[in-house]
Amino acid sequence: MAEKNKLSIICMSGDFDKAIAVFTLASGAAAVNYEVNLFFAFWGLNTIKKNKGRAFIGKGVLARFFNFLLGGRNNLPLSRLNFAGLSPGLMTNMMRSRNVATLTELFHASIALGVNFYACEMAMHVLGLTREDFIPEVKDILGVATFLELSKGGQTLFI
Amino acid sequence: MAEKNKLSIICMSGDFDKAIAVFTLASGAAAVNYEVNLFFAFWGLNTIKKNKGRAFIGKGVLARFFNFLLGGRNNLPLSRLNFAGLSPGLMTNMMRSRNVATLTELFHASIALGVNFYACEMAMHVLGLTREDFIPEVKDILGVATFLELSKGGQTLFI
Amino acid sequence: MAEKNKLSIICMSGDFDKAIAVFTLASGAAAVNYEVNLFFAFWGLNTIKKNKGRAFIGKGVLARFFNFLLGGRNNLPLSRLNFAGLSPGLMTNMMRSRNVATLTELFHASIALGVNFYACEMAMHVLGLTREDFIPEVKDILGVATFLELSKGGQTLFI
């Protein structure tokens, strides 16, 4: 068992609170020397878009419309009690006032600690997104089989 | 480690996008020779109902009411931006126009590739459903203990 | 393989149906002699609050406001078809009339069967909650690294 511990997460959710869970787990695991693989799919792709706000990106009218509505990392809604988008800001304030790392901080900590970011090939096709729409830290674009191979032998979560 | 790779998914969600995730993972894993076990519970049972539309099935007035509202595989809503049920259709069009497999195609691919379908005994009791309400591909009706036994030693996800 | 089977669940959801899933899996696994670890985070903390109803607990105005809105174990909403809070009661009636264990029964069964309850340190900070706000069965307050260590070598789910 000299192998490195491994945590892999399929990040499908585009919710603010779920994104906090993803990056708390990712940075926490990486901090104790785990190999961490994040596989972003569907709504989760919003988290790693280069453009943090709303933008008409993607190929095709429908895709551009969906992508605009979804927005980027700054538009993630709370899965409950969202209050029309007010709550993620309130929650961030609560986190800041308690000296708990905010989403942005957890996100950058994950990058700094060497967490691996992957994007789901199929979801990118559906939403008409290309590699250029994402942050440069995205290491590769994968399908299911490669992700399963990568994550084998560790703990795998679906968030 | 001559054992076969294994992926098991507890499919609790009745959302369209989560169902796509389930069958993308299932067919993708089965295609590279994984043993795949899908355990449908609660809302997830809608996905494997014989009747793909809305129907008053189940024992008891409340159960029949719930089952009608929930509908079948053709009524799965999108977990976000559902627009009163319009979006799953739009999404399917986007998938079709990009040559990405649709939910129906992924579902049938999973069956063709030998993915194992199981239904959760307790959830069936609560919703008053019987084996006859499901597609014939459902291999067995299981409780938690048997599912845990089946999925042991592989990767297990909750979707 | 003389090691005990292990099931660990990160319980992030505050939904009624997801809580049923958590305690069905937990009690079912514990009944066949698994070590079961539940790690409650964010909305999941509502499930283990001492006060089962709504109460202004926590430090800070915002936290107290959030905690009141969230309520306790008796206020968990259904993730779908909640009908303004009516459905969890209907669902409980359906479970009772079918002789299926209700959430309260599954909860107490889990405790009786020796399931381990843990609370997420960070989420408690954000929501301004302290150990005294939770049921005495909470064994410890943990961070991510300790939870990963605890859950290693078993099956881990995120609900």
Image (tube, coloured by chain):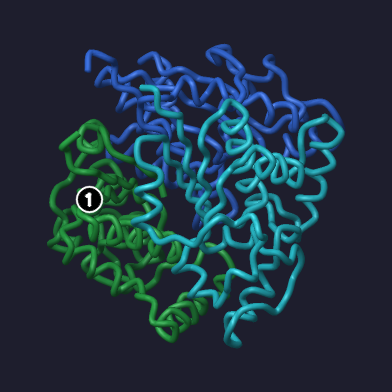
Chain colours: A cyan, B green, C blue
Front one among B18 and B62:
B18
Give left or right: position of B105 versus A95.
left
Give left or right: position of A98 versus A63.
right
Q: Reply above or below: A92 against B96.
A: above
Front one among C36 and C49:
C36
Residue topped by disc 1: B34
Three-letter amino acid code at disc 1? Tyr
Q: Which of the 4 quarters of the picture holds residue C48?
A: top right
- Say what secondary structure mark 1 lies in: loop
Q: Position of residue A98 (x, y in %)?
A: 83, 30
Q: The N terminus of chain A lies in which quarter of the figure?
A: top left
Q: Position of residue A115 (x, y in %)?
A: 59, 42
State the residue at coordinates (49%, 50%): C87
Q: Position of residue C1 (x, y in %)?
A: 22, 18
Q: Which chain's residue wears label 1?
A: B
Q: Reply above or below: A34 against B22.
A: above
State the residue at coordinates (52%, 27%): C39
Mark 1 Cα shell of 10 Å, populated few (<14), some (14-19), many (≥20)? many
Front one among C101 and A103:
A103
Q: Which of the 4 quarters of the picture holds residue B75?
A: bottom left
